[in-house]
Amino acid sequence: MNIIGLDELVFGVDDVQACCQYLTDYGLVPVEVSDEGGRFEGQDGTAVIIRHKDNETLPAPLPTASMLRQTVYGVDNQATLDAIRAELSTDREVITGDDGSLTTLDNSGFALKFQITCRRAFTGKNEHINSPGFAPQRPVNEPGADDSYVIIPASLSHVVYFVPNIKEAESFYIDRLRFRVADRFTQLGPFLRPQGTLDHHSLFLIDTPPHMQGCEHFTFHLAGPNELLLAGKRFQDKGYETFWGPGRHIFGSNYFWYFNSPMGVHVEYDADMDLHDDSWMPREAMASADASQIFNFTLVKKWMPGGDPH
């Protein structure tokens, strides 16, 4: 099943205006935005969709306060959609839309949609680093620090679910949709990679009590650590509150910076995620701060040395 990864996340929210402003300030491109909500895209067309929680077109909510209403996966072609329909329709309702997309529920009750991917080709940026002992990547007389640098998140990276039954959740994605386990936290759950991507994970499952069921966070890829630090600093300067970071994870190796949001989830910037194929042997560790990040910074105010050195 050549599921490429996340195409869209759909939220039903209390405060449409605040969520739309948040995603715009985060750096996504607003598309057809109105008082009813809108679509907010990365460079490759992957997106977050905002609707009011009472919008009748939304899937039914989870039995908790979660505002995530649907997770949309992109696939490569019609054959993959046919394979998904054949597999999942054996034990659950799978509805085929007018556009050929499929909608259903996973084992935990999360609403899913599968469609021919909306991802489009784009020309990204490559962070050029000058490193001693290697040929310069950035030309002579070209400064690397540029405060006018424009940042648009590149691609929807991954989503994290709180699930009340980790075994049932794993079974659906691994046994039915053929996701691969990249790594695992023993007490929490697995990092999962669909077959159509090499990214370390598109989905991370965390075992929680039923009343916590929902989405913990989602993130978009940025070009690299410099872009992540600059985007995060700008976002914080706009008044958004840091939850965790900036830092770098161990499983996946991605740089991270998480923020609180009005969507009831944390929203992350990430960059430089590991890539794996089917020859990779998953690692497992007990969940702890030491296993979660190789480093984690605390942002402080700008500083400049001054005064009389004597």
Image (cartoon, rainbow, N blue to C red):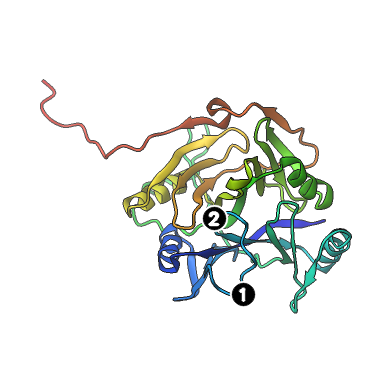
Q: Secondary structure at mark 1?
A: loop
Say few, some or many: other residues with alpha carbon within 10 Å of mark 2 (under 14 / 14 to 19 / 20 or more): few
Q: Is residue 79 left or right of residue 28?
A: right
Q: Secondary structure at mark 2?
A: loop
Q: Is residue 44 above or below residue 32?
A: above
Location of residue 207 by image quarter:
top right
Image coords of residue 293 (percent x, y): 53, 31
Query: What's the CA distance linking mark 2 and mark 1?
Result: 19 Å
| Quadrant into which the N terminus falls | bottom right
Q: Amino acid at mark 2?
A: Ala
Image coords of residue 75 (percent x, y): 75, 62
Eye-nearest disc, 2 or 1: 2
Image coords of residue 96 (percent x, y): 79, 73
The residue lying toward the viewer, choosing from 129 and 228, is 228
Image coords of residue 306 (percent x, y): 16, 32
Q: For residue 286, say whether it is visible.
A: yes
**Residue on which disc 1 sits:** 57
Q: Amino acid at mark 1?
A: Thr
Q: Residue furthest bottom?
A: 98
Counting residues from the start of the chain, the first of labels 2 and 1 encountered is 1
Residue drawn where x is 52% and y is 40% of the image: 255
Q: Is residue 54 above or below residue 198?
A: below
Q: Is residue 240 left or right of residue 94?
A: left
The residue lying toward the viewer, choosing from 4 and 62, is 62
Q: Is residue 110 above or below residue 166?
A: below
Give me the disc on residue 181.
none
Q: Is residue 84 left or right of residue 244?
A: right
Residue drawn where x is 59% and y is 32% of the image: 250
Q: For residue 143, say whether it is visible.
A: no
Location of residue 187 by image quarter:
top right
Give me the disc on residue 65.
2
